[in-house]
Image: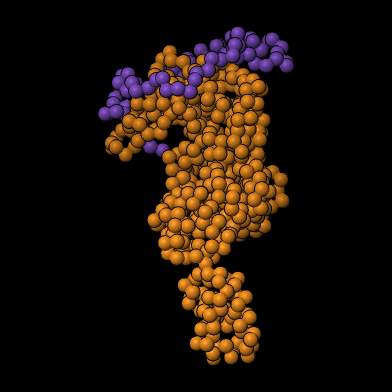
Amino acid sequence: MSYRITGSTGEWEIVVGLEVHAQVVSEAKLFSGASAEYGGEPNTHVSLVDAGFPGMLPVLNRECVAQAVRTGLGLEAEINLFSRFDRKNYFYADLPTGYQISQFAHPIIGKGKVLVDLADGSTREIGVTRLHLEQDAGKSIHDQDPTRSFIDLNRAGVALMEIVSEPDIRSPEEAGAYLRKLRQILRYIGTCDGNMEEGSMRADVNVSVRKPGETEYRTRCEIKNVNSIRFVMMAIEVEAQRQIEVWEAGGTVDQETRLFDHVRGETRSLRSKEDAHDYRYFPDPDLLPLVIEQAWVDELKAALPELPEAKRARLEQEYGVSRYESSVLCVEQAIADFYETVARGADARLAANWMLGDFFAALNRTGRSIENSPVSAEGLRELLGLISNSTINGKIAKEVLEDMVETGDSASAIVERKGLRQVTDTGAIESAIREILAANSDKVEEYKGGKDKLFGFFVGQTMKAMKGKGNPALVNETLKKLLSE
Amino acid sequence: MSLDAKTVTRIARLARIGLQPGEVETLGKDMGSIIDWVEQLKEVDVTGVDPMIGTGLAKPRLREDRVTDGNCRDKVLSNAPEREGPFYTVPKVVE
């Protein structure tokens, strides 16, 4: 189903493209030897290059280039062996040089793609136009003084990857799915930590609307610096609504930069048109063009980890998990690794079931992540082994898992301590059932009179009498036998 | 040729240079003659030639990804017209 907004003149389609700024994982900055680490005392992660002192020259960080290439490979994109750095000129207090070093005409990465999964189970391909390397700016702090802004340059010069999508996105949901998938790929490859709260990933959102069937794009607006996936989705909705109202009132949408205010749930114009930026890009004379070797690209490619799509396909094939299960298990590498440790040497389908169910529930309840899970992969595997070899039944296993989370004891130790071993002795089961039937002779009559639903009642009563330890298959079988006597 | 007043004002604005009314005309003439001089280059036919951005294009030297600099706040702030503790300060910027 296509996403449509209904206005007073009928239905509208939205057209969205995203520019994602992803902070590169590196030790040092893009062009200086100052630390790229988040935080730090104000103005300590700053070299004289970053502070724009006269005569200081930028020297490109090789690892940042490698990170961009790795990301490009992860997006199945063209890797440009020749690229170049340009100056993007503008004045702002947290940009000491008066220009940002970026890549304009010749980005390091060209066309690529991202496959996104939608809630209805379908998959869509969103095109990536380009990825280029550029510097981050510093931070202005406006709330410390009534008349002055304070400047911290710790971020200035940190490497960013700007990843630009094609205007292929047609709904807020697709925008969210694209961002999640992009973040997943970046995190798998280790080129960006994807932490939107710390600002290491943020998005500029280009939105326009048109009538279904129109082939041309109408004027778009750019919503700057949206810092969560939820806000991106909200911003698209309210901005599309605003533009529809403008068109339907007989007006025209002006191309402009806007700001999303999530408190008021609206977008506002950020700059007046006479102030429209003219960046006057030109090649940075301090930097030679960047020329990289195909052999190096091949080397980086060979060292890439297994990427999300490949991992999902392998898990489905190797362990027989469903498409949905693979999507959840592959959200993070650590979860997939955990799963594989459990699944090797256990019933793999049962393992997927337990991870997605009780295990994740336990993580949520304890507020733990997979990295510091209260139950180890080996521990969970042992528990599942006890189910598979009929030592305990599934219901008891849930109780054992709770105990494992709480005490840290092993599954078998808990089963012994609490005497939870499943009763498979048919004699014991039969005598428990006989007692139940004798105590409920009226219900037995009703059952025999055709009230089949009472079978569940007898199972429940028997299990209760056996403290949940009866083997469910044997209980069922024996009950059927005795009830038909 | 002389650059018109609107263009001169716009360039001055982009460069954050404040002009006195009388300067606009003078600057327009000066900049116009600079452009005329550079425009002579257009007489050369460069069809199919990529723009040259430098000479002796060796491969750039790249740095290793190691922290070798920073932690020099006093130097960083030494040129600041105004500072407050660990920050340098500017007239309030509000968008």
Q: Does residue B8 appear anywhere in the picture?
A: no
Q: Is residue A456 above or below residue A238?
A: below
Relative depth, front residue between A337 and A99: A337
| x 59%, y 19%: residue | A290
| x 60%, y 75%: residue | A476
- Left or right of A280? Residue A407 is left
Q: Is residue A178 above or below residue A103?
A: below
| x 53%, y 33%: residue | A191
- Left or right of A381? Residue A414 is left
Name the quarter where the N terminus of chain A is drawn: bottom right
Colour in which chain B is drawn: purple
Which quadrant of the structure image shows residue A80?
top right
Which quadrant of the structure image shows residue A186?
top right
Colour in which chain A is drawn: orange
What kind of colouring is applied to the model shown?
by chain
Which quadrant of the structure image shows residue A131?
top right
Q: Is residue A166 above or below residue A212?
A: above
Name the quarter where the C terminus of chain A is drawn: bottom right
Relative depth, front residue between B62 and A189: A189
Q: Does residue A275 appear anywhere in the picture?
A: yes
Q: Is residue B84 above or below residue B29?
A: below
Tally the marks. 0
- Left or right of A7? Residue B26 is left
Q: Residue furthest left?
A: B85
Relative depth, front residue between A460 and A212: A460
Q: Position of residue A20 (x, y in %)?
A: 54, 38
Relative depth, front residue between A131 and B18: A131
| x 66%, y 22%: residue | A294
Q: Position of residue A453 (x, y in %)?
A: 60, 82
Q: Position of residue A267 (x, y in %)?
A: 49, 47
Q: Position of residue A377 (x, y in %)?
A: 51, 49
